[in-house]
Image (tube, grey):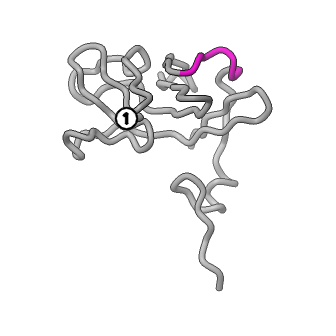
Amino acid sequence: MAAPYFVGGRSLEEEEMANFVKVITATDLAPGNGMVVEIGGRPVALFNVGGQFYALDNTCVHRGGPLGEGYVDSTNMTVQCPWHGWVYSLVNGASPVNSMARVEKFEVKVEGDDVLVAVD
């Protein structure tokens, strides 16, 4: 039996089962910036780094700060919480300082001009 093919940390089967929701048009978020979008009443931080989009839970695990309003470091692929400076990887949601500090990461894909985020 063939090994499963993985897409962004998910097997191809899981990828096909994910429910993707359109959150913005790609031009709504300039490169190097973040914003907060709401998916089913849940705030999600969305980021654009050089045309590649990333999505994390919007709530910093430290004190609940809004990550979508934080400083995006395009070089290190991180976001810094605007309240107390905690840093998270845009790629996997983990803190490069303390790997136990982690926020949920969501799969993102672009179809045409639409940016879609996977929700379970």
Q: Which residue is mark 1?
A: 76
Q: Quadrant of residue 71?
A: top left
Q: Determine which quarter of the picture holds residue 7.
A: bottom right
Q: Nearer the viewer, residue 112 or 60?
A: 112
Taking the magenta stretch, the answer to whether it contains residue 29 is yes
Front residue of this view, candidates 65 and 74:
74
Residue 43, position in %: x, y? Answer: 47, 22
Residue type indicated by callout 1: Asn
Residue 62 appears at what percent x and percent y? 21, 27
State the image quarter where residue 103 is shown: top left
Which residue occupies the extreme front position in the image? Answer: 75
How many labels, in total? 1
Left/right of residue 36 with respect to residue 23 in the rendered view:
left
In the image, which residues are magenta? 25-31
Relative to residue 40, is residue 111 depicted above or below?
below
Looking at the rendered structure, the secondary structure element under dot 1 is loop
Where's residue 111, x and y in %?
Answer: 76, 36
- Identify the residue at image location x=41%, y=44%: 92
* Quadrant of the rendering where the N terminus is positioned: bottom right
Q: Quadrant of the C terminus?
A: top right
> Is residue 10 one of those drawn in magenta?
no
